[in-house]
């Protein structure tokens, strides 16, 4: 995965934001809408695209486009940085493949120790009983 190449494929759109902005709220477009077309991406291999489709399918549209919004800050530039970082985190988490668990056997020494301990406890409890006088 080439981060610079992926970032160059992103498309940003500035939109008027709701919320804080003071006198600029009706004049400045500070909200950033990021969109990334997964199918058209040249930076990702086909395997990576399939992995992302399965892992982040809830965030993708029906055309496999990832859309993120950011209007946390009054500055358009800071919102662009925030949404880009958020996008990269989503892509990295989506490309993560967990290790496959290998089934292991219980060692014979552990089994023998457990049986020996059980026998010791059994003998201890046997010795506490009243003697059988028959």
Image (spheres, helix red, strand yellow):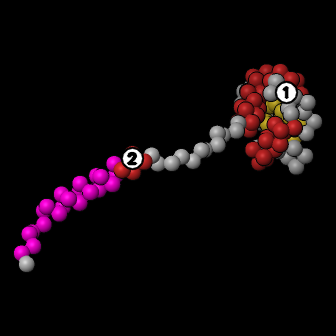
Q: Which mark identifies residue 41?
A: none
Dot 2 corresponds to which residue? 110
**SS assignment for the magenta stretch, majority:** helix
Residue ID at (33%, 54%): 115
Residue ID at (93%, 36%): 40
Determine the image quadrant of residue 37: top right
86 left or right of 116 in image: right
Tell me the SS state at disc 2: helix
Tell me the SS state at disc 1: helix
The location of residue 126, given as percent across then percent down, is 17, 63
- Please give the range of residues in magenta: 113-133
Residue ID at (87%, 28%): 43
| Residue toward you, 7 or 46 | 46
Q: Which mark identifies residue 6?
A: 1
Residue 41 is inside the magenta segment: no
Q: How far apart are marks 1 and 2 (CA)?
A: 52 Å
The location of residue 132, given as percent across then percent down, is 9, 73
The location of residue 53, given as percent across then percent down, is 81, 44
Residue 125 is inside the magenta segment: yes
User: Considering only vertical position in the picture, is 91 above or below 50?
Assistant: above
| Residue toward you, 4 or 102 | 102
Task: Look at the image and tell me in which quarter the N terminus lies.
Answer: top right
């Amino acid at each position: 995965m080439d981060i610079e190449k992926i970032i160059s494929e992103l498309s940003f759109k500035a939109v008027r934001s709701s919320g804080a902005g003071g006198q600029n709220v009706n004049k400045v477009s500070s909200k950033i809408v990021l969109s990334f077309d997964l199918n058209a991406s040249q930076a990702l291999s086909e395997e990576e695209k399939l992995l992302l489709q399965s892992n982040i399918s809830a965030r993708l549209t029906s055309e496999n486009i990832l859309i993120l919004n950011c209007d946390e800050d009054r500055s358009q530039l800071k919102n662009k940085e925030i949404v880009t970082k958020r996008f990269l985190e989503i892509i990295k988490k989506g490309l993560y493949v967990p290790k496959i668990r290998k089934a292991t056997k219980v060692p014979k020494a552990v089994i023998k120790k457990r049986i020996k301990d059980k026998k010791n406890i059994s003998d201890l409890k046997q010795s506490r009983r009243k003697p059988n006088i028959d």
